[in-house]
C-alpha cells in the first residue's frame, strides 16, 4: 500500500494526487462580467452544495500575478452563470481554458453565442444545454496558494427543450455531460451508466 504524509508533499504533488483520485469531476463553464467585459472559463473543482435555496460552488486557483479574471469579475459584479459542458461543446470549452490576457473575450474566441440572461448581468452561452444563473453568496479564500471557493445561489435554471420532464427529472443522457480526469487532457463521457436502487432509510443526498 502506498502512503503519503501530506505535510511533506509539495502543492503540485498534492494536486496530482487529488485530481487523479477525485474523479470524474463535473465541469462548470462559468461566464462573468467585469470592467473589461465578459469572461468565460471552465473549472472542475465544482459541485452542488445546497437545495434550499439551490446553491453551487466552484474553486478557482490563483495565477502567478494574482486572482484570475473570473474572481476579479465576480468581485466587480457579484453574479455569474454556470453552464454544464456537454460533449458537443467540449472543444469550445477547451478554448476558454486558455490563459488569455484580461479583457480578451473567450466567448468570441471559442465561437460561442452570448445571449442575455434572465436575472443576472453576465451573459449565458446559447450552445450549452444547461445554464444556471447565480448570485454570489460568498467567496472564501482557502489555503496558502490560495484557492477562492465561490458559492452562488441559483436564481434561474435554463434547459434545452426535452431535457426536463414534468416531474423535474433531468435526462442526463440527453445533456451528455463530460467529466474531468487527471492530467492536462483527461476527460470522460457518461457512456456506461447503471442504476442501483437506494436501500430503505437511505439519505436523499
Image (cartoon, grey):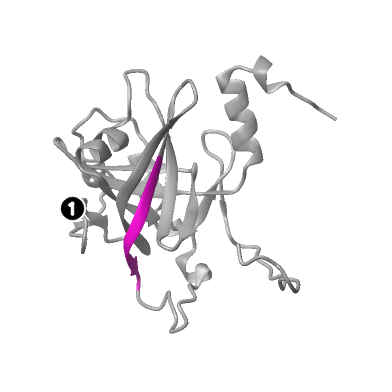
Residue located at (26% from left, 52% from top):
112
Name the outermost residue toward the bottom: 166
Q: Quadrant of the N terminus?
A: top right
Give the structural element (helix, strand or loop) at label 1: loop
Name the dominant secondary structure of the magenta segment: strand
Q: Position of residue 76 (x, y in %)?
A: 20, 37
Residue ID at (42%, 55%): 55
Task: Report if residue 151 lies within the magenta region.
Answer: yes
Q: Image quadrant of residue 58? A: top left
Left or right of 205? Residue 77 is: left
Image-based side of 140 in relation to 201, left or right: left
Visible in this render: residue 27?
yes
Report crowding for label 1: few under 14, some 14 to 19, many 20 or more residues within 10 A (C-alpha). Answer: many
x and y, in percent, of residue 81 in the image: 30, 53
Compared with 116, 107 (above or below) is above
Q: Is residue 199 above or below residue 100?
A: below
The image shows residue 191 at horizontal and vertical percentages of 61, 62
- Of all residues, the one furthest to the right in this rendering is 1
* Quadrant (top left, top right, bottom left, bottom right) of the C terminus: bottom right
Residue at 42 percent across and 74 percent down: it is 163
User: Is any atom of residue 128 visible in this view?
Assistant: no
In the rendered structure, does residue 185 fall within the stretch colored magenta?
no
Nearest the viewer among 166 and 98 is: 166
| Drawn side of residue 132 relative to residue 142, left or right | left
Q: Which residue is rendered at x = 37% and y = 23% of the image?
A: 63
**Closer to the camera, 25 or 200?**
200
* Count of labels in the image: 1
Q: Which residue is mark 1?
A: 121
Magenta highlight range? 150-160
Q: Quadrant of residue 201?
A: bottom right
Amino acid at each position: 500500500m502506498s502512503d503519503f504524509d501530506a505535510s511533506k508533499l509539495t502543492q503540485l504533488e498534492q494536486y496530482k494526487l487529488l485530481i487523479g483520485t477525485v474523479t470524474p469531476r463535473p465541469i462548470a463553464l462559468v461566464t462573468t462580467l467585469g470592467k473589461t467585459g465578459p469572461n468565460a472559463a471552465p473549472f472542475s473543482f465544482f459541485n452542488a452544495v445546497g437545495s434550499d435555496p439551490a446553491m453551487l460552488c466552484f474553486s478557482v486557483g490563483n495565477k502567478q500575478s494574482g486572482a484570475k479574471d473570473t474572481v476579479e469579475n465576480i468581485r466587480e459584479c457579484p453574479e455569474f452563470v454556470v453552464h454544464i459542458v456537454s460533449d458537443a461543446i467540449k472543444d469550445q470549452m477547451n478554448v476558454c481554458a486558455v490563459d488569455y490576457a484580461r479583457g480578451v473575450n473567450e466567448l468570441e474566441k471559442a465561437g460561442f453565442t452570448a445571449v442575455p440572461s434572465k436575472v443576472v448581468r453576465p451573459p449565458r452561452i446559447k450552445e450549452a444545454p444547461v445554464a444556471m444563473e447565480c448570485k454570489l453568496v460568498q467567496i472564501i479564500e482557502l489555503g496558502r496558494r490560495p484557492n477562492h471557493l465561490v458559492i452562488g445561489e441559483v436564481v434561474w435554471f435554463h434547459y434545452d427543450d426535452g431535457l426536463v420532464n414534468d416531474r423535474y427529472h433531468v435526462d442526463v443522457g440527453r445533456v451528455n455531460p463530460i467529466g474531468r480526469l487527471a492530467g492536462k487532457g483527461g476527460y470522460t463521457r457518461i457512456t456506461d451508466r447503471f442504476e442501483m436502487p437506494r436501500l430503505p432509510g437511505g439519505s436523499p443526498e
